[in-house]
Structures are given as C-alpha cells and as structure tokens.
Image (cartoon, helix red, strand yellow):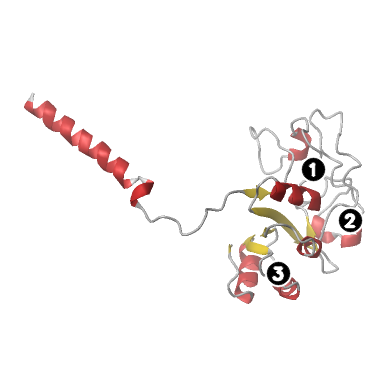
Amino acid sequence: MGKRRFWLSVMIFAVVGVWLGNSAFLGPQPSSDPLRLLAHRGVHQTYPRDGLDVDTCTARRIYAPQHSFIENTLPSMQAAFEAGAAVVELDVHLTPDGAFAVFHDWELDCRTDGSGVTRQHTITQLQALDVGYGYSSDGVTYPLRGQGVGMMPTLSDVLAADLPGPVLINVKSRDADEGNALATRLAEAASEGKVFGIYGGHIPTQVALDALPGMRGYS
C-alpha cells in the first residue's frame, strides 16, 4: 500500500504541476486586446479540405455559395471588416507594367476566364477578366460567373479604399525586384496604419522589410 500511495502522490503532483505550468493566469496579462480575427483573402467561398494538394483548383470544389463575395476583391475585404475582422490578408503579383495585382493564384486558369501565369499579364489584361468565372460546387453550374468582371483590384486601389482596418500582404514570388517595388509603392502610398505587415517569398519579403524600417513581417 505504501508504494501505491507514493506513486499515486507522484502522479497527482505531476498532473498538478503540468496544469499549473500551462495555466494562463500565471503568465503576464496582455497590455491590450488580442487580435481578434484575420480574414484570409477577405470573405471568401469555402470548400472541403480533404484530398487537397498543391495543384488542386479549389474554386471547382466550393460548397454551394451562401454569399456572392469573391476573394481578394474590395467588397469581400469591406465585408470581412464589417463582420469583425481586425486584419484582412491579401495576395499580390507584380505585373510587367509595374502594378501590384491583388489575386491569389500563380496562374489564372482555375478562378478566371484567362490563362497563363498571373504576373506575366498587364494590369489592363488582368482587370478585364472575370475573377468569379471558375467557381462551381457541382462542375455544371457556375453561380459567380459574370459577377467578377473587372473586380481584380491593384494594391494601390486597396490602399486608397479607406478600409476600416489594415491589410496583411502576401508576396507570391521569389524575385528581389518585387520586394524593391513593393517597398517603393508602400512608401509612396503613405501606407502607415494601412498595412499590418508583409510575408511570403523569402527574398522579396526580406528586401521589402529591410527597406521599410518598423514594418512587421516575416519571410
């Protein structure tokens, strides 16, 4: 009985120690309210995540839409803030004519009526596309088709839109030139307070962060 009580006592002390060591009340209290919600690409269409791989076209496997918002557009960002988001994440690609197109995919084929690599198209070409073209829950009906024509914004459009909160910028490429261009654009746009941070491809992200002292981010 003595040994049993001894080991029971050891187990009890171990459990209590683990609980105390992981209890929030023992740690320092935050000095401000926690960040509540980061909205990925704004209010977007959702889809089942089973069986996903790097080449999966997620637009072709959405659930039946409960709303008409299209990711990475200004209406979807505005709606995300109105729903309580503290920050909206968006994706950028530097175009040949020097704009930053706000669009997630490396290629256009999945979500739009265009094709090819996103960053190889001018912003005029990109803004002529329908960014709701490819969405379908059954492969037969396309409920957002026709609703996204001309709705791909530039980063400048987003920064000028006077949104209720800041954005987190995801750099999709690995090119240093894109980091330099992004830093220049943000400096020109007087983006303080409008950009929560930058993340993404190591080289361009680090270049941008080095050129923008005080900017949050990680590569």
On the rendered structure, is 106 left or right of 201? Answer: right
Identify the residue shown where x is 82% and y is 57%: 153
> Looking at the picture, does residue 154 appear above or below residue 151?
below
Which residue bears the numbered disc 3? 191
Which residue bears the numbered disc 2? 127
Which image quarter holds the C terminus?
bottom right
- Residue 206 quadrant: bottom right
Mark 2: few/some/many CA within 10 Å (<14, 14-19, 20+):
some
Which amino acid, mark 1? Phe
Q: Earlier in the sequence, mark 1 or mark 3?
A: 1
Identify the residue shown where x is 12% and y is 32%: 6
SS state under label 1:
loop
Identify the residue shown where x is 66% and y is 37%: 52
What separation in Å lies between label 2 and label 1 (alpha carbons)?
17 Å
**Residue 213: in sight, yes or no?**
yes
Which amino acid, mark 3? Ser
Q: Are marks 2 and 1 in contact (CB under 8 Å)?
A: no
What separation in Å lies between label 1 and label 3 (alpha carbons)?
25 Å
On the rendered structure, is 15 left or right of 62? Answer: left
Residue 38 in the image: state x and y as whole percent. 62, 50
Mark 3: few/some/many CA within 10 Å (<14, 14-19, 20+):
some
